[in-house]
Image (cartoon, helix red, strand yellow):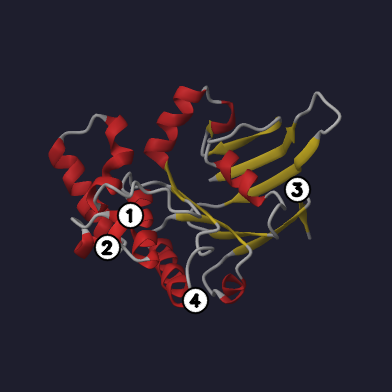
Amino acid sequence: MLNVKNLCKIYSPNNANVFHALTDINLHVNRGEAVILSGISGSGKSTLLSIMAAMDKPTSGEVIVDSTAISKLPDLHASAYRSHHIGFIFQHFNLLEALSVKENVALPLIPQNLDNDTISSNVATAMRLAHIDHKADANVHELSGGEKQRCAIARALVNDPKLILCDEPTANLDRENSLHFIESLRELKTLGKTIIVATHDPLFERVDFIDTTVHISDGAIRE
């Protein structure tokens, strides 16, 4: 489903402070797999994830999802691709605190020009899958950390994405809520979602549904 080919990311390539964030990354992920990108902070895993999500572009190389070279899409087309095919769960949730849960979950659907009935149905389904439907009308600022994470999961699911990407998703959660999040990923995998998680949380080392763990250090994949 996803192929990363000879991917490099260089910051400030034209001055003396050049930084190689990623170097010659090659990775293949099959449809329906759950993959961990493991590495300490600054290892390059979040940069790789953002390029996989078409939120950033590589210096060289490419990312292909199915038959689409997403790393080469113009910004407008990359945004449209994300809104239809990718669900992203951020470390800091990235929710709008003044809006309700259901309003936050609906946000990714706005660019798609869907009718209100379709939006309401998709939002309800996503909230139910994320076990946050009982808080649909609550404002986000009223939620606990675990509830905010479930809202973020629902937002990532609302467009029924083929690929779910998670960037340090348990970094702001306690152990109990981290375990709840991991169980949510288990449920999503049973639905056939392809899941990639960038994390250095040791809790993921004992997760039995993970197909592959990819170790990243200093911007390169290590055996």
Front disc: 4 or 1: 4
Q: Secondary structure at mark 2?
A: loop
Given contact means CB atoms under 8 Å apart, are the residues at marks 3 and 2 in contact?
Answer: no
Residue corresponding to mark 2: 132
The residue lying at 58 percent from left, 46 percent from top is: 49
Q: Are marks 1 and 2 in contact (CB under 8 Å)?
A: yes
Q: Is residue 137 left or right of residue 19?
A: left
Q: CA distance from mark 3 to mark 2?
A: 36 Å
Badge number at residue 154: 1
First along the sequence among labels 1 and 3:
1
CB atoms at circles 1 and 3 under 8 Å apart?
no
The numbered dot on residue 219 is 3
Q: Tag count in the figure?
A: 4
The amino acid pointed to by label 4 is Arg
Amino acid marked by disc 3: Gly
- Residue at the far left: name it: 117
Which element is circle 1 on?
A: helix
**Which residue in the protein does label 4 denote?**
175
Q: Give the amino acid type for the residue marked by disc 2 in the picture.
A: Ile
Name the residue at 48% across, 51% down. Answer: 90
Labels 4, 3: front one: 4
> Alpha carbon of mark 1 to alpha carbon of mark 3: how far?
31 Å
Left or right of 154 in this view: 79: right
